[in-house]
Image (spheres, rainbow, N blue to C red):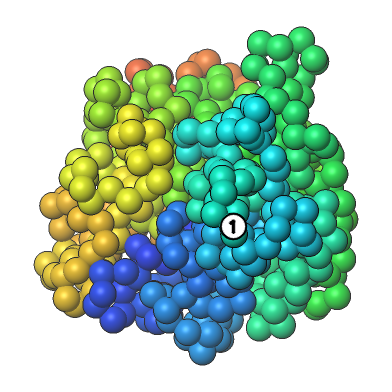
Amino acid sequence: SPGAEWWRSAVIYQIYPRSFADSNGDGMGDLPGITAHLADLADLGIDAVWLSPFMTSPQKDAGYDVADYCDVDPLFGTLADFDAMLAEAHARGIRLIVDLVPNHSSDQHVWFQQALAAAPGSPERARYLFRDGRGEHGELPPNNWQSVFGGPAWTRVTEPDGTPGQWYLHLFDSSQPDFDWTNPEVHAEFRRILRFWLDRGVDGFRVDVAHGLMKKEGLPDFMPAEDAGSMGGDSVGVPYWGQPEVHDVYREWHGVLAEYDGDRALCAEAWMPTVAEIAMWVRSDEMHQAFNFGYLMTEWDAAKLRDVIVESLREYHAVGAPSTWVLSNHDVIRHASRLALTADSPQGDGIGPNSPGKPDPVIGLRRARGATTLMLALPGSAYVYQGEELGLPEVIEIPDEARQDPTWFRTNHERYGRDGCRVPLPWVGDAPAYGFNTTGASWLPQPPEWARLARDVEAEDAASTLSLYTTLLTERRARGLGTGTLKWVEGYDAEVVAFRNGNVTVIANLGSEPVALPAGSVIVASGPLADASLPTDTTVWVQTD
Ligand code: ISL
């Protein structure tokens, strides 16, 4: 597995702990469940794990609402379980990065509780963004910002004396108050949190909402997109995304990580509109990586894919970093469904009860396998979201009463939210809860197709998606594709993506006509090949020297 600056070419597997594996039968995945399956992840051939939040939390946003940053939520286990998991991962050569949520805490965090009990203008309030309301009696929110999950981004509190009082900012749910990152106390606290996990041995952090920590001074009203354009930039008008002061925070954290040996790394989660804006969080003295959402958001179209690959290599190269590649995560429609959707937002909350049509599962899976076979041949680092190695689709048929994502509630059921990509994994086709645990309990219901998509079933099938991922990861590592260089191959139709990386020629056929295979031996194909030709929606790796 990669050594120095391992993150430049690593394949990093995202574990969403509540849905991975449940050791105690309460229907919620946990840390001992992860430890028990690390051997399976080593067999799959990944280099590192990114673990979504497992810290103490009331779980209003599935753990992205942290009440204690330096402890494990009892749902998931204990700090001793964490240490055991980390030791087992390291023993197997798997690095571990953990999720850090610095934009906001839970409203149950002791600092927020202290802020509610303290007076306006107090140092306790100054750790968050409390403001007086507008209107004669302060009855209107301080500005017009909207929550990402829907509804206003401000909630009014009742003061300790019982009167209606100030408002606090929450870019997400009202249970997730935003910190004030102009306050040095907040900086000091997060340096302490970083060191707490670095001292335990983690290899780095995935930084949640990395583009949101700093807000424009004065918290001015948000200018509608039309006007923002006339100010000269895509996100220039958004006063809470991508403010330049955020760079200071990441320089500070880079310095903290640099005090530790072993190439600890920071990866930014920053949903900005262009690859260039995403890449701006990466610098040799700031973040090591940023998720390439430009690639994720690209539809199944050869010209658009070529363009985004060119743009990604250029923009990340310009900041001295490798590109990352990612197709799925816990916030977006699983790519085995998304790539068969026509005109929807890739974010899970983009589909709802009134969305047109349902993605075709056969086309979706074929394209997902083709897209992954393309992705894992690209130079740079790749992220794999738990379950995509089984070809799991988005689960759309979840009973309304079982849904848990705050988006579902905050939009009055107009958007389904992101539960459909978070359904607990199937490990055993013929077992209670498909082997997620032994009791059959599951925090979200699992659909019947989990029986044939279970890990043990796919492990026996050479044509399964699990077998495909295992071959791709083995060959990627053996051939050093992650540290290679991409060279475009000319001479194919516009609907074909073709490039070389080392001795591997990669051909993806997104057109409707079969494409002739180049001379050489086939290493791996995302689907069946017919008469030495590459069918629609299929990608192949051919050794051509
Ligand atoms: O800001 C956005 C769009 O411009 C959102 O896509 C936003 O960046 C994204 O929702 C952030 O997600 C992360 O933080 C959320 C949490 O619910 C997600 O699960 C997490 O990945 C709040 O902590």
**Left or right of residue 284: residue 478:** left
Q: Position of residue 410 (x, y in %)?
A: 40, 38
* Residue 412 visible in the displayed image: yes
User: Residue 179 versus residue 131: which sits nearer the camera?
Assistant: 131
- Please tell me in which quadrant of the rendered image residue 423 appears: bottom left
Q: Can I make out residue 96 in this image?
A: no
Relative placement, left or right, of 282 versus 80 is right
In this picture, residue 406 sits left or right of residue 97: left
Q: Quadrant of the C terminus?
A: top right
Residue type highlighted by circle 1: Asp
Q: Which residue is drawn at 64% across and 17% down?
A: 224
- Tell which of 505 and 303 is nearer to you: 303
Residue 461 at x, y = what percent? 23, 59
> Residue 467: horizontal and vertical position, in percent?
34, 58
Q: Residues within 10 Å of mark 1 (few under 14, many from 20)?
A: few
* Rendered position, 203 above or below 136: below
Give residue 261's position: percent from left, percent from top: 80, 78
Mark 1 lies within 8 Å of ligand 1 (Cβ measured)? no
Q: Name the residue under label 1.
A: 161
Q: Please name the residue shown 73% across and 23% down the image.
A: 237
Q: Label 1, secondary structure: give it.
A: loop
- Residue at 71% of width from left, 82% of height from top? 199
Q: Which of 140 and 374 is in front in this view?
A: 140
